[in-house]
Image (tube, rainbow, N blue to C red):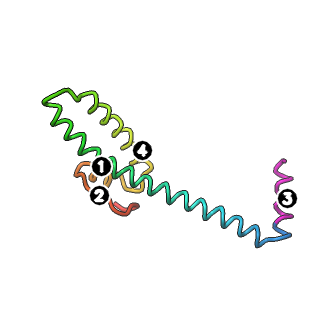
Amino acid sequence: MNDKQKRKLLKKHIDNNPTEVINEYRDVLTASGDVINMQSECIKKGIAMRIFNQEVIELLVKINKTGNLTPTIDAMTQLACEFDTLAMEYGPYTKQAYIQAVVTHSSLGGGNNG
């Protein structure tokens, strides 16, 4: 079906039952909003886990002085850095607030704020 046919079909659909078309679009927008909200919550949980991960890394560094956890520490640190890059680019917090929370091991709260 080409664009012209699609427009003609949509116009016919709108002309026959405009309320139904509006309701369909509203339902799609509502579902899209729900997906965005779920993604935001997922990112917040991931960030909280990342902050906790920093504490674990620091403990492993201390423990490593008595053994050899270097491969584990290096792997966790690399994953944390990759996550940090994504969280600062796509996360719900400002870059400065995120960095401060990781450095101080503190919670970030609501989101979309500093």
Classify mark 4: helix, strand or loop: helix
Distance from disc 1 to disc 3, alpha carbons, whole Å, reads 52 Å
Classify mark 3: helix, strand or loop: helix
Mark 3 residue crowding within 10 angstroms, few (<14) / some (14–19) / many (20+): few
User: On the rendered structure, is 42 left or right of 51?
Assistant: right
Distance from disc 2 to disc 4, alpha carbons, whole Å, reads 18 Å
Instruction: Give yes or no for residue 111 being in the magenta stretch.
Output: no
Residue lying at 69% horizontally and 64% vertically, measured from the top left: 25
The mark nearer the N terminus, 2 or 4, is 4
The answer to whether the residue labelled 1 contacts the one labelled 2, judged by CB atoms less than 8 Å apart, is yes
Distance from disc 4 to disc 1, alpha carbons, whole Å, reads 14 Å
Distance from disc 2 to disc 3, alpha carbons, whole Å, reads 52 Å
Instruction: Give yes or no for residue 8 being in the magenta stretch.
Output: yes
84, 46: nearer the viewer: 46
Q: Position of residue 78 (x, y in %)?
A: 33, 34
Q: What residue is disc 2 on?
A: 107
The answer to whether the residue labelled 1 contacts the one labelled 3, judged by CB atoms less than 8 Å apart, is no
Mark 2 residue crowding within 10 angstroms, few (<14) / some (14–19) / many (20+): some
Camera-near label (2 vs 4) is 2
Q: Position of residue 31 (x, y in %)?
A: 61, 61
Can you tell which mark lies on residue 51? 1
The mark nearer the N terminus, 1 or 3, is 3
The answer to whether the residue labelled 4 contacts the one labelled 3, judged by CB atoms less than 8 Å apart, is no
Residue lying at 50% horizontally and 57% vertically, measured from the top left: 38
What range of the chain is rendered magenta? 1-13
Camera-near label (4 vs 1) is 1
Can you tell which mark lies on residue 9? 3
Distance from disc 4 to disc 3, alpha carbons, whole Å, reads 42 Å
Q: What residue is disc 4 on?
A: 86
Instruction: Tell me the amino acid under the disc marked 4.
Output: Leu
75, 100: nearer the viewer: 75
